[in-house]
Amino acid sequence: MINKNVFAKMTEGKLSIRILGSGTSTGVPQIGCDCEVCRSVDPHDKRLRHSALVTYRGKNILIDCGPDFRQQMLACGSPHIDALLITHIHYDHIAGLEDLRGFKDLPIFARADVIAALHQRLAYCFAQHPYPGVPHFNLVEIDDINPFDCAGITVEPIPVMHYKMPILGFCIGPMAYITDCKTISLQQVERLHGVPLLIINALRIEEHLSHLSLAQTLEIIEQVKPERAVLIHMSHGIGLHEKVSKILPENVSLAYDGMVVEINKQL
Ligand SMILES: [Zn+2]
Ligand SMILES: [Zn+2]
Ligand SMILES: [Zn+2]
């Protein structure tokens, strides 16, 4: 378990995070659905697939790179990216990798199982004699336990379970970022206790096999007691942004696409 003093030292400084996509794998509106959320004209109810851009100590770290990545990058002025962290191999978290071809030698951090799966899915990029122009990926293996250097910033992995799949969240400075979690160990909850900013998934109101529901996420937030929590990876089953926002605890908000959260922690 991580010593709290070590964690406290790491939380110094200003961090900002831009939620590039606040939606689950289908996005919202969902194709073919005419529920009130999918029909909503409120821009807060339009949710692209998952991705976030963290700015900390002068570096831009991307978390996941989903199928809407190109459009998300163009919408925020195509900032430079120093590193990519991948939480897990599902399509809504990696489908935009091809669009990183402009970022030469970008380090991409992922677990060994994710790296193995990428070699299979994008085999043409790893061929002995690749076709000219295919993107080159600089994959760096990380594990569930050890902090690692990411563009000069120490990042700590947070192992969580996505139903039966072990996946990673990440601690960066004063923020803990978790997506696609269904269960988290008590040890990890204790370790995150009092984190200034917790970004965490909440799929919908009803329970789901592999993702936390709103009530389950609020229970974890209650245990972690962050100063502020922001909910991500929502489906249309979360309800209308405006209505749900009114019933959340004061320190909890629903993310929306393009939302920027800033935290400045001087200890
Ligand atoms: Zn997902
Ligand atoms: Zn719908
Ligand atoms: Zn997933």
Image (cartoon, rainbow, N blue to C red):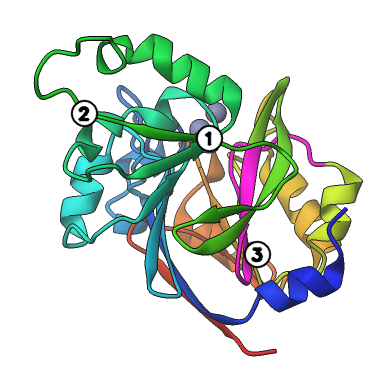
> Which residue is tagged 3?
248
Q: Is residue 223 visible to us here?
A: yes
> Which residue is tagged 2?
135
Tell whether 181 sits left or right of 145.
Answer: left
Indicate the amino acid at tag 3. Answer: Leu
Tell whether 30 sits left or right of 255.
Answer: left
N-terminal label among 1 and 3: 1
Q: CA distance from mark 3 to mark 2?
A: 43 Å
Q: Residue at x 41, y 9 (%)?
A: 120
Estimate the x, y position of residue 176 in percent, counting from the top left: 64, 59
Q: CA distance from mark 1 to mark 3?
A: 33 Å
Q: Residue at x 53, y 37 (%)?
A: 237
Indicate the amino acid at tag 2. Answer: Pro
Indicate the amino acid at tag 1. Answer: Ala
Residue 44 included in the magenta stretch of the image: no
Q: CA distance from mark 1 to mark 2?
A: 17 Å
Estimate the x, y position of residue 116 in percent, counting from the top left: 51, 16
